[in-house]
Amino acid sequence: MGRLYMREVSLRVDRYLVTTRVTPNQLTYLMTVCGVLAAPALLVPGIAGAVLGVLAVQLYLLLDCVDGEVARWKQQYSLGGVYLDRVGAYLTDAAVLVGLGLRAADLWGPGRIDWLWAFLGTLAALGAILVKAETDLVGVARHQGGLPPVREAAAEPRSAGMALARRAAAALQFHRLILGIEASLLILVLAVADALRGDLFFTRLGTAVLAGIALLQTVLHLVSVLASSRLR
């Protein structure tokens, strides 16, 4: 989505920032705050809450583009900035899915709060974080083992069956549904469907599906890492 449209917006924002004292890391902190605010935004009932959630995540995406562009323009690079960017991505993905679970639990509804949906949303968030961690920990393991950064070719599974499964998953792209940007848009679609139906059926169905995808993706991604040459 950054390539599709947000880079066009971010480059116009950059011109107002490169002449200021605003640092890339400050923009990354603000990016993280915007992403985390998606969770409370999604607690607003109805379509309005889903729209607020999308806006929060879109601001996150905008700042995610801007902080790197400003860093390159000002030549202000740091490992701290890279680290903060990853933390922001972790927190945003988790915030959107936790917010979805709490939304499905119907906190402000007249009936009893069903915490099962909050649990499933949190489970989906945990899975989304674990998938990212499985990728990042490859670099940690290689560094601790004295190995250079992983090459792209090493990511390909060694067995033909695993390679085929990996290509199929990449083609379907179902795993992207547990990422904050895509999940926020899905939540908006579910909110519209719920408004037409008059209940939270579709939001709850989406919560269960995303929890299932997150758990499946956690296992499949771990197997993919272990079956590849990334740790060798």
Image (spheres, grey):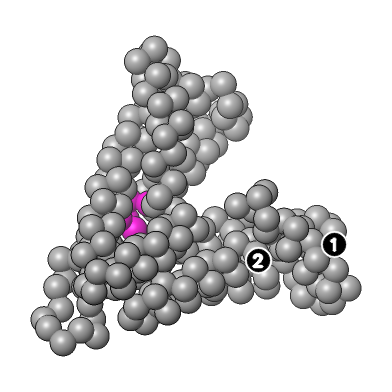
Q: Is residue 88 visible?
A: yes
| Quadrant housing residue 73 | bottom right
Task: Report the residue that reaches farthest toward the front.
Answer: 196
Of 214 and 7, the residue lying toward us: 7
Q: Is residue 109 above or below residue 62?
A: below
Q: Give the residues in magenta.
A: 123-128
Badge number at residue 63: 2
Of 164 and 89, the residue lying toward us: 164
The residue positioned 68% from the left and 72% from the top of the image is: 26
Q: Is residue 176 above or below residue 46?
A: above
The answer to if 15 sits in the magenta stretch is no
The residue positioned 46% from the left and 55% from the top of the image is: 182
For the residues marked 2 and 1, what is the alpha-carbon distance in whole angstroms? Answer: 16 Å
The dominant secondary structure in magenta is helix
Question: Which percent across, then down, holds residue 193?
Answer: 32, 65
Of 139 and 97, the residue lying toward us: 97
> Tag 1, which secondary structure?
helix
Mark 1 lies on residue: 74
Q: Is residue 93 visible?
A: no
**Given the image, on which type of amino acid does mark 2 rest?**
Leu
> Tag 2, which secondary structure?
helix
